[in-house]
């Protein structure tokens, strides 16, 4: 028998409730969802345990839409990417330390505090290397949606293509740092090292602009 701590038990209960809610939604889709022909339900709809390797066909782990974020050397703001926040400009802020690109609107879902849905147009944007570097720690990189963005700009930087880009850039930077025996911060702070790193990214298929 495995005993869980109070915090772990609370998380387990929440995950169990989330899975039950997801299964209830699937059941509603199968039996009661209104159809264009006037009928109800899509009985042919089913989950695929063989895809995820789980007994109920749901994902192995819960999707975390927004995580904690680092206090980064550089934080991306809405004024860097938002269309209305950049009057007179026709593009997002150009970052000299770019390690990738993304393109998605800022969308924030309604919160439990009652804040309404938010949808803001953005320009295609770059991913600055400074957003992957914590201010107070060396040799640590953000490799997912924990990079230096605000709650608002997380709405466009959280998308999977951006996450993948961030993770691959962090991995490539870690390899470069090991090879050259330098810190990630040193790469960003040295024009020659940064240029070399960006050239490596381009050779690997990264789009930087």
Image: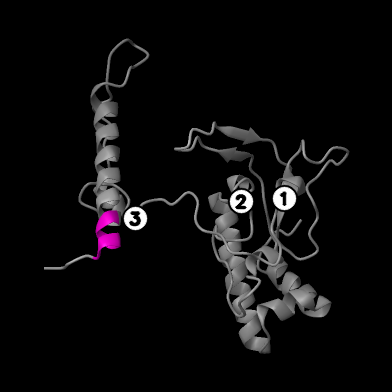
Name the image quarter holding the N terminus.
bottom left
Q: Range of the magenta residues?
A: 5-10
Q: Nearer the viewer, residue 135 or 18?
A: 135
Identify which residue is drawn at 62% across, 73% down: 172
Q: Quadrant of residue 107?
A: top right
**Label whose residue precedes the other's in the sequence (1 or 3):** 3
Where residue 157 appears, x then y in whole percent?
61, 51
Q: Is residue 122 magenta?
A: no
Q: Which residue is mark 2?
A: 157
Identify which residue is drawn at 56% across, 49% down: 159
Q: Is residue 9 magenta?
A: yes
How crowded pointer 1 is (Cα within 10 Å; few <14, some 14-19, many 20+) is rated as many
Q: Nearer the viewer, residue 61 or 109?
A: 109
Name the image quarter holding the C terminus.
bottom right
Identify which residue is drawn at 51% across, 37% down: 109
Where residue 184 appears, x then y in whole percent?
67, 78
Where residue 185 appears, x then y in whole percent?
70, 77
Q: Residue furthest top?
A: 38
Where residue 61 appears, x then y in whole percent?
34, 55
| Label 1 close to label 2 by CB (< 8 Å) | yes
Q: Which residue is mark 1?
A: 125
Please name the predominant secondary structure of the magenta segment in the image: helix
Q: Residue furthest left?
A: 1
How crowded pointer 2 is (Cα within 10 Å; few <14, some 14-19, many 20+) is rated as many
User: Label 2, label 3: how many angstroms apart (C-alpha)?
Assistant: 21 Å
Q: Residue furthest bottom?
A: 181
Q: Nearer the viewer, residue 2 or 196?
A: 2
Q: Secondary structure at mark 2?
A: helix
Tell me the number on the disc at residue 61.
3
Say above or below: 108 vs 185: above
């Amino acid at each position: 028998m495995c005993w869980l701590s109070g915090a772990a038990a609370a998380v387990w209960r929440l995950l169990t409730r989330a899975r039950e809610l997801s299964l209830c939604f699937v059941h509603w889709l199968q039996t009661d969802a209104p159809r264009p022909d006037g009928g109800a339900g899509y009985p042919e709809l089913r989950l695929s345990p063989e895809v995820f390797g789980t007994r109920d066909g749901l994902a192995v782990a819960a999707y975390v839409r927004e995580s904690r974020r680092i206090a980064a050397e550089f934080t991306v703001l809405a004024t860097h990417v938002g269309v209305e926040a950049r009057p007179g400009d026709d593009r997002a802020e150009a970052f000299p330390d770019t390690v990738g690109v993304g393109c998605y609107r800022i969308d924030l879902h309604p919160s439990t505090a009652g804040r309404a849905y938010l949808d803001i147009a953005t320009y295609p944007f770059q991913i600055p290397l400074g957003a992957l570097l914590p201010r107070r720690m060396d040799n640590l990189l953000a490799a997912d949606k924990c990079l230096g963005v605000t709650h608002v700009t997380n709405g466009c930087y959280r998308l999977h293509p951006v996450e993948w880009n961030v993770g691959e850039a962090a991995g490539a930077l870690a390899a470069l740092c090991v090879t050259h025996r330098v810190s990630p911060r040193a790469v960003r702070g040295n024009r020659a090292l940064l240029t070399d790193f960006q050239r490596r990214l381009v050779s690997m298929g990264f789009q930087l602009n």
